[in-house]
Image: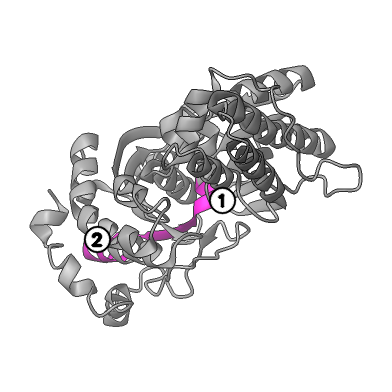
Amino acid sequence: MADSRLRSEPLVLGIETSCDETGVGIVRGHTLLADAVASSVDEHARFGGVVPEVASRAHLEAMVPTIQRALKEAGVAASDLDGIAVTAGPGLAGALLVGVSAAKAYAYALGKPLYGVNHLASHICVDQLEHGPLPEPTMALLVSGGHSSLLLAPDITSDVRPLGATIDDAAGEAFDKIARVLNLGFPGGPVIDRIAREGDPNAIAFPRGLTGPRDPAYDFSFSGLKTAVARWIEAKRAAGEDVPIADVSASFQEAVVDVLTRKAVRACKDNGVDHLMIGGGVAANSRLRAMAERRCEDAGIILRVPRPKLCTDNGAMVAALGAEMVARDRSASSWDLSADSSLPVTDTHVPGTEPEDDHEPHGHAHAHGHAAHDHDHFHELSKDNLYS
């Protein structure tokens, strides 16, 4: 009976540190128990973008308190966990290393299985916390500051197939760039979304990249759009004219979401998939949600989009995928798990190369051996702190 419950409702803690958010989530099966996030976005704002070294140091400072906050929020002890999951990649190498090192230290000290999982696959799996089990297959459109991808997922734990991706800039990156040109600050997505509501999306005919008949059907390109918008703004300023910020924001945003939704719906139709899931930070965009809803309804496609807080980077999505790994009896990662900044989405998780019950000292050495200063930062992982 206990084993049956473990397989159906595993209690898993997830750690996310791929960029500038330190996220720790706890789930039981498909139920979200805690979602604690410590963001360093304010520290990056003055630089106009994420600074890897700043992000890594912020993760080091926030890790233990955020884990403790999540355990308290969930009302569980660390000893109750059935496993610990962590983003192994893709992402910023230094930031990933902090999360992987912490997860290995906790998993080893607690004697729990460790699951290194894929950041992009986690963005898909998080939808299960809101809308229940994912249909198989599911089509996923992932849009963020670092990724714009169309993925077909017959099995979220073992079979995710890339259909298309950006060939240059990601959608979120384009939002940030245009926000900087308009002097709107960082991050650009939320502020452009807000200002665009006061503008006319048809005021300026900005280009739609890779939408010609001979262009790749599922790939994206936002570099040309970004350049076109920047030049339009520069021309207005050079002529001494006021820049209509609301209209520029609305027209730029319309060009982005038009291409994203058009290609996502086409991918569903071409592959005979009747469910579309949209995830990633840009999925919080209100215009993207509205256009996707309309186009999916017209095409007879069921749309699934998590609430905005679950679209941005968080530990809950990592825990959700980790719980699915446990439920489907996927192999745990070994103690020599390492961060991989370019981990392909086809590697939904990093399975172990050694027996799962290997708890010998060499595993302990791997858990702490990636950087000489790991011990200095994780000396707090005493039994009292781990189980608090």
Distance (Cα) linking label 1 and label 2: 29 Å
Q: Magenta residues, as a range? A: 104-122
Secondary structure type for disc 1? loop
Estimate the x, y position of residue 317 in percent, counting from the top left.
Answer: 44, 43
- Considering only vertical position in the picture, is 134 above or below 294? below
Q: Amino acid at mark 1?
A: Thr
| Crowding near the residue tagged with mark 1, few <14, some 14–19, many ≥20 C-alpha atoms within 10 Å | many
The residue depicted at 43 percent of the width and 67 percent of the height is 93
Estimate the x, y position of residue 288 in percent, counting from the top left.
Answer: 61, 28
Q: Amino acid at mark 2?
A: Leu
Q: What residue sits right under mark 2 in the picture? A: 60
* Residue sitting farthest toward the left: 384
Estimate the x, y position of residue 119 in percent, counting from the top left.
Answer: 50, 53
- Considering only vertical position in the picture, is 265 above or below 386? above
Q: Is residue 371 left or right of residue 195?
A: left
The answer to whether residue 294 is seen in the rendering is yes
Q: Nearer the viewer, residue 147 or 33?
A: 147
Say if the magenta span includes residue 205: no
Say if the magenta span includes residue 112: yes
Q: What residue sits right under mark 1 in the picture? A: 157
The answer to whether residue 333 is seen in the rendering is no
Q: Nearer the viewer, residue 350 or 374?
A: 374
